[in-house]
Image: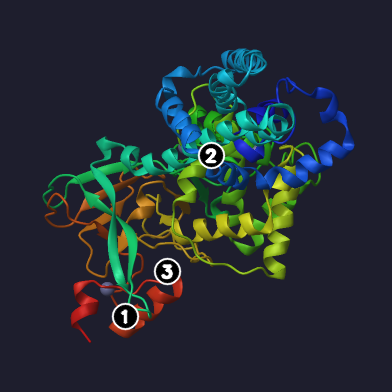
Amino acid sequence: MKTSTVVGATIGLLAVAAVGYAIYFDSKRRNDPEFRRRLKKERKRVLKLAHEEAKTLSNKSAQTVEEAFAGISEDDFPTSMEQREKFCMEQLSAGEALFTQGPEHYAQAAICFFKALKVYPAPAELVMVYQKTIPPEVFTLVMGMLSKDVQSKHERYYTVFPPKDMNVEVKEKPEGVAADGQEVMRRGLVARKSFSAGEIIYTEEPIISSLEPSLEGKNFCHYCLKQIVNEESKVPCSKCTQAVFCSVECKVSASQEFHDVLCTKDLEYASSPEHSLHAYTKTTRKLVLEMLAKFLVMMVHEGSQNSRPEYSSFDHMEQLRYLGISSSEEEEKEMELLKGALGSNIPGIDEFITEERYLLMKGRLLYNIYGISTSLDPNLDDVEPLPERHRSVCDAPITGVGFYKVTSYLMHSCKPNAKIVFSEYDHKVSLITTREVKAGDELFVGYIKNDSLSTEERRLELFDKYRIRCMCPLCETTD
Ligand SMILES: [Zn+2]
Ligand SMILES: [Zn+2]
Ligand SMILES: [Zn+2]
């Protein structure tokens, strides 16, 4: 993967450099260091600006935005990179031609500029250029449309996710009462139809998974975590000794999604920032940092694809519950390792990984990852428990951890009505009912192993790890 060219396609703020084509209006000013310095400083404020500008719309303009917005459909936008580039240029020229004809053409011009913004790989930068080059009235209209677009994308999320064929939906559920008497709500997964005990509700692949460090390079696939029983089918990475794969397909997927960037290439070089990240994972046995690195590389890969889904993995991640992490020397060290490993491969990543964003992303992974068990030998006894928190849903030893879009929404119960099974002995989860479930019932799994714990111990562990005050029948009755 040629990261320096594909990064241009990444959505939003990640695409800071190396866009495939010059900004149409003002390439000269973009080369001015003063302008670039301001661009960097102001980039963050763009969405806030959109929001504030939208508020200043007069009633008439607001109506114009409303009408224009209703007339734009997602199908209006081309999908391939080449077509998007052409489309963007056409909209920009049309917009410019329209506004020079006078105020009666401003609304039409604004629609063109909004459409260009929708396909431009670095919308925040384009907004900055608009602010300096188009009439303020047109700019306000474009900002109104942008603000409306962000809002509507947010509102639509749970109507298209999870996909219907997974038989579940996300619903708000009460989670107790706060100190001020307000009811606290959380999200959970609810069955769309009835199931009898032992039925598979859905199967899901992770966004990202990571192998337990001591199993690396041995007989476990670096991509799908499957145990490689047949020595002949083992496919090694051609550049490092850590990654082996169960098949050519897994090797190709891993290369495209993350391994080309994160491979330590230890057959070529003695040491590198990728090496430092890997060594840290190996010695601490903490997998979340490596998962975050994989996640970010994969996000760039995802953004470079011709057919991009409406919601990126980052959009999915942003919806999830997280664990609050405060900054510390250790977090700083991890952040530097992450920036080091990605910096030379992903231009702009340094600016993207702010401390705030880093802690939030890490907190989301820590809260939502599951332990995965793929070993065909249930007595894989030389694997120690992992030091970082993860939902422990399997009895067999953990061979890795995974981060899932839908499965993350499953709530804990000490008396669950479903369980997670790795039925194909790889990183795919299947959710299986353990008793009858009716349409509309919330689905629960056990986040912790609670067989030998008292109610008090369970409560402590659940609160300590997941900030959960369990309201299951076992916790409610055995007081
Ligand atoms: Zn595999
Ligand atoms: Zn490798
Ligand atoms: Zn409970």
Earlier residue among tags 2 and 3: 2
Q: Secondary structure at mark 3?
A: helix
Up/down of 252 relative to 281, above or below = above
Q: Of 443 and 141, which appears nearest the observer? A: 141
- CA gap between label 1 and label 3 equals 17 Å
Indicate the position of residue 381 as horizontal and vertical percent values.
Answer: 45, 63
Quadrant of the image containing the N terminus: top right
Residue in the picture at 35% in, 50% down: 407
Which residue is painted at 40% across and 27% down in the image? 70
User: Tag 1, which secondary structure?
Assistant: loop
N-terminal-most mark, 2 or 1: 2
Q: Tell which residue pokes out farthest to the right in this image.
A: 33
Residue 286 point in image, percent of width and height: 58, 61
Report if residue 454 is visible in the image. Answer: no
Amino acid at dot 1? Leu
Few, some or many residues within 10 Å of mark 2 (<14, 14–19, 20+): some
Residue placed farthest to the bottom in the image? 479
The vertical placement of 387 against 144, above or below, is below
Q: Residue at x 49, y 19 (%)?
A: 77
Question: Label 2, on which residue?
Answer: 57
Q: CA distance from mark 2 to mark 3?
A: 43 Å
Q: Which mark is residue 466?
A: 3
- Whether residue 248 appears in this view of the structure is yes
Residue of label 1: 453
Under mark 3, the amino acid is: Tyr
Q: Which sits earlier in the primary sequence, circle 1 or circle 3?
A: 1
| Spatial separation of the CA atoms under disc 2 and disc 1 | 59 Å
Name which quarter of the figure residue 10 lies in: top right
Q: Residue at x 48, y 61 (%)?
A: 322
